[in-house]
Image: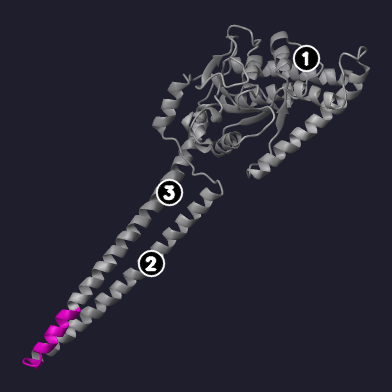
Amino acid sequence: MGAAASTASGALVSGIMYILDAIRKASVRENPTFANMTASADAEEARAEAEKARAEAEAAKAEAKKAWEEVKVMRDTAEAEKRQAEEELQRQRAVLAESQRAEEHAKEWARQAQRQANESTRIAKKAQKQAEEHLKKGVQPVIVPSPEEVEAAKRRVQYKEGLFHFAVAGVAGGGKSSFINGFRGLHNRDTAAASTGVTETTLVITRLPDPNQENPFVWYDIPGAGTTKIPDWQYFNEQGLYVFDCIVVVFDSRFTEADIAILKNCERLGIPTYIVRSKSDVHIRNIMRDRGYDSEADVNRTQRNTLYPEAREKYIAETRANIKRNLEDANLPDQRVYMVSNDAILSIVKNKKLPHNFIDELELMRDVFSKAYSRRCVPTLSLATLR
């Protein structure tokens, strides 16, 4: 690593420590996500009003039918009165004229009511057709959590004001538990570390406070959507993910529908998200092996020094292209993907040492902590100099 790179990395590390110190000393505001959900609730109320209008249209149609039946009765009455006119012609003419006027008035009212009912029915059928088309295309309905659901979710995760709650989601074996351990400065073998494994080790949200009591952070290991019977689009609300300060979506080799559902819901509610590809060191080594690298034969590391930069660039380029394509397919805005090694994160947090093979670890730490500070802390410093 050159002197310029070392200086820049050192500045990032200093900046991160500066943010952490500011977070520890700052007064913390309420999570702005809850205000966003109020706006979403207003939208749900508008949808309910539209449904009410459809019901009223159906009622109007029924009233029109009833009115038409009444017209038929009145017409029969008029015919009877006409027959009586032969005996009392003068009196019947007046009665008949009044009956005809009443009949025309009723018919006109019925025609107007029928037109209104037809228009309401047309609008309702159009809305139903659009909803069915959306479901066929995978556009899932928006479900806004109620205030009671928000409070229940906060109780489930033991939410505490004054702390920052960071959720890490992803499929089993994607490296999310090791990722959390790295940010908490713990080895996977440590007693307080999150459980790791190639299969899902937890079916419920696991709460993991930062071992350093100076850090007001609580990390949450979120079970993968594939471990439950909940559809991907419902998973976000069922797990109460709307209460967290941010959600890190960790993936290893694939980007799932559950990941897309989480990103879409977070965008809707204004919750910061970070897309992270873990095990970057492993992926780069695999690319080197595909190109013929043999660590046992490369005694003086000459082959490694040649292949590693090429493999690293290939890995970065392919990962960015893959994420960009996935986001476009899901109609989501472009978003940065952070490529990290969990060992590199652990080295930075635990040993305050920058490894030689780091990629985006420092930028990720800076962005997570900077966003947490800007969203929740009463400002005491400017973050512009840390960019």
User: Looking at the image, is mark 2 or mark 3 earlier in the sequence?
Assistant: 3
User: Looking at the image, is mark 1 or mark 2 earlier in the sequence?
Assistant: 2
Where residue 168 appears, as percent x and y from the top left, is: 59, 24
Q: Distance between the Cα atoms at labels 2 and 3?
A: 23 Å
Give the residue type that dot 2 points to.
Asn
Q: Identify the element where label 2 is drawn.
A: helix
Residue with the mark numbered 1: 354
Q: Nearer the viewer, residue 207 or 154?
A: 207
Q: Nearer the viewer, residue 217 or 228?
A: 228
Residue with the mark numbered 3: 46
Image quadrant where residue 24 sits: top right
Image quadrant where residue 110 sits: bottom left
Label 2 neighbour load within 10 Å: few <14, some 14-19, many 20+: some
Quadrant including the C terminus: top right
Q: Nearer the viewer, residue 91 or 206?
A: 206
Residue with the mark numbered 2: 118
Q: Distance between the Cα atoms at labels 1 and 2?
A: 71 Å
User: Pointer 2 and pointer 3: residues touching (CB < 8 Å)?
Assistant: no
Q: Which residue corresponds to the image point at 70% horizontal and 36% vertical from the top-left? A: 323
Where residue 149 appears, as percent x and y from the top left, is: 41, 31
Label 3 neighbour load within 10 Å: few <14, some 14-19, many 20+: few
Give the residue type that dot 3 points to.
Ala
Q: Which residue corresponds to the image point at 63% horizontal and 43% vertical from the top-left? A: 330
Magenta range is 75-89
Q: Is residue 185 left or right of residue 150?
A: right
